[in-house]
Amino acid sequence: METMSADPTNQIRIIEWDDMDKRKFYGFGLFLSMTIRVTVYPTTLIKTRLQIQRGTSLYNGTFDAFWKIARQEGARGLYKGFWVNSIYLISGQMYITAYEVSRQQLSGYNNWIKSLVGGGVASLVGQGISVPIDVVSQHLMLQGQGKDRRKQLQKERVMFGKAKAVIVELFRRDGVAGFYRGFFASMLTTIPNSALWWPFYHFYAQQLASVAPSYIPHLMLQAVAGPLAAATANTLTNPMDIVRARLQVEGGKSIVKKFKQLYVEEGLWGFSKGLSARIIGSMPTTFVIVIGYETLKKLSLRSDLAHTRQW
């Protein structure tokens, strides 16, 4: 009886920047990015609320938060701040361009170095846009939590209910600096996370390809590698992500003081707050993103190279 065995030579050929038609890349990219953002936004909102709350004052975990928000605030409550957050589409295009161009500039180095440096550079480039968006959208995400949406509606409209009101209030209170709360902390979170995700992603993809039967599509292996890399990177960077969120919403300048405050109030367990939401959110999110991104790259391949890559 014939068996189907793994093919150790079944390696995934990465599509590089020079291999793609840039008009196709940006055109398809905007559509895919918006589709993905609509799908995964509720998990981002839940993660933010869990990280900002003290102890379990409002929500007792990810699923409890989901049901309470849906019941008390309606489906729209899961998309508070969405339109402000959608400006990330610009940041996303800048991010991926910086990553691909960085890989191109480091073509003489091995893939681990190209991915690590490229991921870090891409994250740094995106921060100028993404941090102000984060600050505004996080304030919007926190509105009305723990209260019945019908009772809060009028109050929100008067006080802090729309993006314009949030922006005006932040500027009045703190000036331009108010939009960059936790900027340094944000860089310490997103840069390592991005720098770690890309090399782990390629590592897991190649490891899976080396043990998987050759008939399994590479896209399937990459879709599995993405969530594995996300879980690894999120676990390593979660403590800094909590501090970043608190600096941006609560204010303050000292990262060390925020770490100490979190430890005093909640102990070591406090550093894992929101981790399950990050992982639960990031795994399906990354699954969708990887399928979208790798499909985008394959669709954007120059016509003379289309036959050189396996789906």
Image (tube, rainbow, N blue to C red):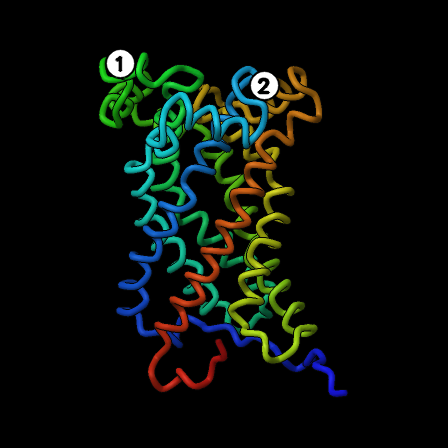
Q: Residue at x 36, y 72 (%)?
A: 299
For marks 2 and 1, give the one nearer the viewer.
2
C-alpha span from label 2 to label 1: 26 Å
Q: Which residue is drawn at 67% across and 68% down?
A: 207
Compared with residue 263, is residue 292 higher up or lower down, i.e. above or below? below
Q: Which of marks 2 and 1 is nearer the N terminus?
A: 2
Identify the disc placed on residue 159.
Answer: 1
Residue type at mark 2: give it.
Answer: Thr
Give the total number of marks visible in the rendering: 2
Q: Where is residue 239 in the image (x, y as percent from the top left)?
A: 61, 33
Quadrant of the frame with the N terminus:
bottom right
Q: Residue at x 32, y 12 (%)?
A: 151
Compared with residue 19, is residue 88 higher up or lower down, i.e. above or below? above
Residue type at mark 1: give it.
Answer: Met
Which residue, given by chain and number where applicable, does mark 2 sit on?
56
Secondary structure of the residue carrying numbered label 1? loop
Q: Which residue is drawn at 60% across and 18% down?
A: 55
Q: Is residue 5 left or right of residue 77?
A: right
Q: Position of residue 194 (x, y in %)?
A: 52, 50
Front-most of residues 20 and 282: 282
Front-most of residues 175 and 12: 12
